[in-house]
Image (spheres, coloured by chain):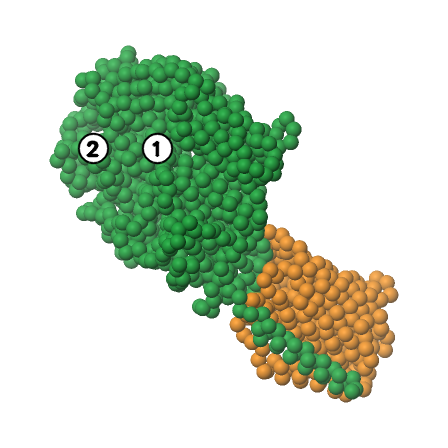
Chain colours: A orange, B green
Amino acid sequence: MDRPRPLILATLLAVTCIMHATVARAEAPCEGANGLSRPGEGTPIRVPIFGPADFGTAQEVCARSRISLESRAALLVAESEFYGTLLAGLALRATFVLPRKTWISLWMPGIESRYVANATVDTTQGSLGAGALGFHGTFFELPEVALVAYGRALLPTETLFTNATRYGIEPGISALYRPGSSVEVPIGIAFPMTFTAGPGTVTSLVAPAFSADVVWRPVRGFGIAGGAAIRPADSFDPRAQLRFYPWQNLQILLAGLFPVAGTDRTSAAVSLSVGWESF
Amino acid sequence: MDRRRLALVASFGLAFGFLALFRGCAAKDGCMGGDDGACVPRVPCEGLAYTCASTSPELSVRTMTRPDERPPGMNALGAPGDLLLQNDRLTVVIDALDAPHFLAPTGGNVLDLVPRGATRASDDELNYVFTATGILPGDAVRYTRMSVDDHSPTYVAVIARGHLDGRPKTTVVTRYELRPCEPGLRIRTELFHGEREPETFFLSDAFYWGGREVAPFVPGVGRGFVHPDLDLLELDRSFADSPFLAARPEREGAAAYAEVACGKKTLAGFQSTSISAMGIPRAITMPGDGLAFERFLLVGEGPGLSHVADLALEAREKLHGEKTREIRGRIVHPSGAPIDPGEHPSLLVYSPGAGAEGDTISSRAPWSEVVPERDGTFHVRAPAGGALRIEAHALGRALPVRAAVAAGAADVTVADIPFPEVGVLDARIVGVDGKGTFGELVLTPTSENDVERLRGSTHGAFDEKICVPWLGPAHGGSPACNRALVEADGHVRLVVPEGRYFAYATRGPFATLARAEITIERGKTSPITLTVEDLPGLVPRGALSADFHVHGGASFDSSLPERDRALSFVAAGVEVIAATDHDVITTYERAVRDLGIERRVIVMPGAETTGHILFYRPPGADLPKVVGHYNFWPLRPNAGLPRNGLPWDELQEPGALFDTVSAGFDGQGVIQLNHPLSGSSFGRDEGFLTAIEYDVRTRVPDAPSAEGPGQLRRGNRGGRTALDYHAQEVMNGTQTKQFHDYRLAWFSFLSQGILRAGTANSDSHTLAVEVLGYPRNLVFGDHTLAAFDMARFNEDVRKGRMIGTNGPVIVASIDGVGPSLSPIAPAADASLAIEVRAAPWIPVEEIRVIVNGKLVKIVGGAAIARPQDAFGKQGTVRFNGKIPVAELLADVRAEKDAWIVVEAGLPLVRAADLDSDGRPDTTDNDGNGVIDFRDMSVRDGDPTYVEPQRPLVTDPRFHAHVVAPGHWATAFTNPWLIDRKGDGWTAPGL
């Protein structure tokens, strides 16, 4: 079992420092093509299934207050090993804008239902999931590009563990490139690290994720996104999303993800987010 | 302090806070965080405490060094190298890591467990208890290290370390701990899930009962000895929680077992007479999490359940404070006559359900079962508090007698429980000289209307429909089911339910059958004498009858005592036996010697390899398989080695298996393919041809392949392929469907030039359900018991110089040459000379001649003699005639060679191949004379091939059916290979 390395601490320190660097003053991609902001800008495709809470999932780039109901489901079928899982979860998520383009994010511990089958020895269990608290800050902005750094901590509220507790931290960087009024390219790099503390021992897992999407929004009320994430050695995850903004700042986001290659055996995952954004 | 600095400090604080947590605020506790090689599971069952009466109690742990340290009983398998823990109350053997058994990939599990200081013989009746987390091979634990922790006189322990066989990062450490004066073994297993994905683990003990050995029992409404049908594909409906598990032995003199959870109040699991699994409830275990399972494994003496159930309740009282009380009483006959053990008295103690239906099986909650002592007294523990009832059982049936036990906490003595008077049959079997003789006595009711009334079981377990009347546990020693063995003095005394019966005396199909009609009345003894004599001239001189597939109590699925198994050899008139117990070499030497029957029977030590661990997975197969069963004999037994010298036979394809086991042959042995197209049991195919889905109409290619019939050509480094066996079962037991199937496979191979001797064996595991010697082989070659030459005998077996039969004897030759796998070139005017003989009570209706797989000639009707008196000695020759070989080969193209097989007995059961797999699968189930899809639909999901049922009393089949249930008179010869042109025999092809 690995213990936290000094490198991790140094990274944390660096991110913390960077978060407080002076932000370049310029027009920003989050303010819309004609200075008219719209809901959902700077939002990557999010299918939060690979980690507790939404660890390992790309974060937004634009400083906005949001509240959303996040639902997700993932299916794994490994027929040759007679193994399968089905995960479904529901959680509340919120971000709160602070001054100077910083914000706090909160993933509330939600309800999760898991079905895991090992041949015909199977069971379904409901549980409370983990929460996550994060601090995000824009540290670089140009008219077409914005960079955000963040640090998040896992709230150890999971009830599924019997004799262990899971903790975690996640530093990361999100970026937005807006080449045109109706196109944007969110990019994310995340380094989620989880630590499962059992009776006197700790098991750690580092699962970095790199993602890039292309979002096309021809009209205010609808957008479509496509992209992929890479989790080195775990999987390559092509993904797509439909985005609906039917009324004012209401947004409905429906995404699907289909991991290929790698050791992760997840067959498919979907997510549905219904939320409201204020800016 | 400004906000930036505040944020920085907060970040650092957060980071260091995590570190503090990580650095071990939690102390190292056992192995639930993983096995570092030094961790030790916590002490199991800390709430238990037993006091010792002795000031110097016995407690030890050691490695076995001598075979005589093995616990008593045929089931006991402990061998030098295994670990033996002992206190004054029990002995337990943990098998060595390199001596695995049954379903486990390694040792490190409980192999033998017997009580000590018992008042009665208490043989080991525990096949195996191993730790697992699911039903797949990868869910068993692969132990890699074992260490001994000797802290005597406080405790002794064995620590076994390993991981799940299919998940190397999921570590498992088990602590087996024994303390002085305790009636059980404390066990704690700690698992750490080190893999990446969540798993459902059912961390449990798997009790491999094997079938036919013990009846598992769990308290609970509608439970007791009754359990839902276990289907591994639909396990969910079988899971239930229980306060404890107990297991009742089927035979006298065997131990009983129980398990109680320590950490929790209940065990979760499922039951069947083949396998039970009890553990902590199924749970999703996340990566990095750990599980612990703590339990107390108890052993007590038999008979019945109460001794060990009392221990389980006592343990629960210590662990959970559940109060119990003792119920005492006595069963009596109204006349004052003593209780006869032959009544098999038994009392079931239960909590009644509500209302008028409270005594029904579905409403009541059994707690225990007690067998009264010889003087009728009994004592049994049950939970204190609620009202209880006691239901009396005798001869396998519930009596209309119940005793009520009022609610309360104090011990109670109930009023005498009246048991009805019993009837006794006092029988003698004598020879023609009037002297007692070995044999078997079989009873059956004279009226069909009495069948249900007299049917018995072990409280619903082991309910065999043929056990009418029920004289004893269906799978136990004599008397068992509806029969009893008779020793040399010819005398047997039986307690029999009142009624009218036919009593048959038999000594196998080559002797006369005697019958008397008797009436058994309560309180009276009915004497009879029956005379059985050999039928000289029935069996050709120089032929010995042999059964090459026989099981006894050493097999995991038989509880037949060694002595009774040996006695059955001579009672059935079988002269040569291959002892083929599952996965262990046996000899029956001691029993044969004790009975003084060395001159009557030769036992060749051998074994049946029985694949347990699924591994064989051809491309496209949904599930891994095993490679079926094979018999090997004669083998060199060695009690100083695991399995008495049989090598571990798992995870090997047939060719490699043949190499492994045949290294232990005593001389040049015989390898026999058993029940080649038999179905599967718990997902394990019992025949290799089933495993490879062999179609009897398809050719086996010359080259090996990973799928299809080419799998038969797959070899191994030693060079042997799956076809390198010597003999194949053509008849196994009495099921006609099996004969249809195995015969077709054998014909298919003969036609393709895959020449293997055909054998006929009983595969007997019990006295009654499969009767020894039905069928058997007659091996020709001038053999005698007095001058038995094993090597020459087995040479004749390998060369097919024999017939298989369950009664009819075929004496046939072409140009004076009997059947064999050696080709002959008969003269142009050669004839097939056939004489069919049979004891008068064995029906013969037709003789069939098969050429190259086609039926070319039937002799029947008036050409077959039918004796008038089934119980006489006359009329044993049923047919004597000749058929020109040229006539038989008339439809065979001149350039082709041929093979000829003769069959005799009853006509083949009419059946059709409606699913087009080359084998008949459906009988005329609607009785309209036509076999079509309507015969399938009337079965409504049940098997569409229906075996012949019990015939009417007037049917010529009746007598043989009573003696050997399911009997359908059949005999077959091995082939004559006809080399028509004298240029060497060439297979005729399919």
Amino acid under disc 2: Ile
In screen coordinates, is B783 left or right of B411? Answer: left
Q: Nearer the viewer, residue A173 or A242?
A: A173
Q: Position of residue B555 (x, y in %)?
A: 34, 42
Q: Is residue A56 above or below residue B950?
A: below
Q: Is residue B262 above or below residue B905?
A: below
Callout 1 secondary element: loop
User: Mark 1 sits on what residue?
Assistant: B477
Residue drawn at (42%, 49%) of the image:
B53
Q: Nearer the viewer, residue A168 or B742?
A: A168
Q: Position of residue B522 (x, y in %)?
A: 42, 16
Q: Chain of mark 1?
A: B
Q: Report how far apart the C-alphas of labels 2 and 1 lie in the structure.
A: 19 Å
Location of residue B436 by image quarter: top left
Bin the neighbour count of mark 2 within 10 Å (Cα to Cα): few under 14, some 14-19, many 20 and up.
Answer: some
Q: Position of residue B497 (x, y in %)?
A: 42, 20
Dot 2 and dot 1 within a common chain: yes
User: Mark 2 sits on what residue?
Assistant: B597
In which quadrant of the rendered image does the N terminus of chain B lie? bottom right
Mark number, residue B645: none
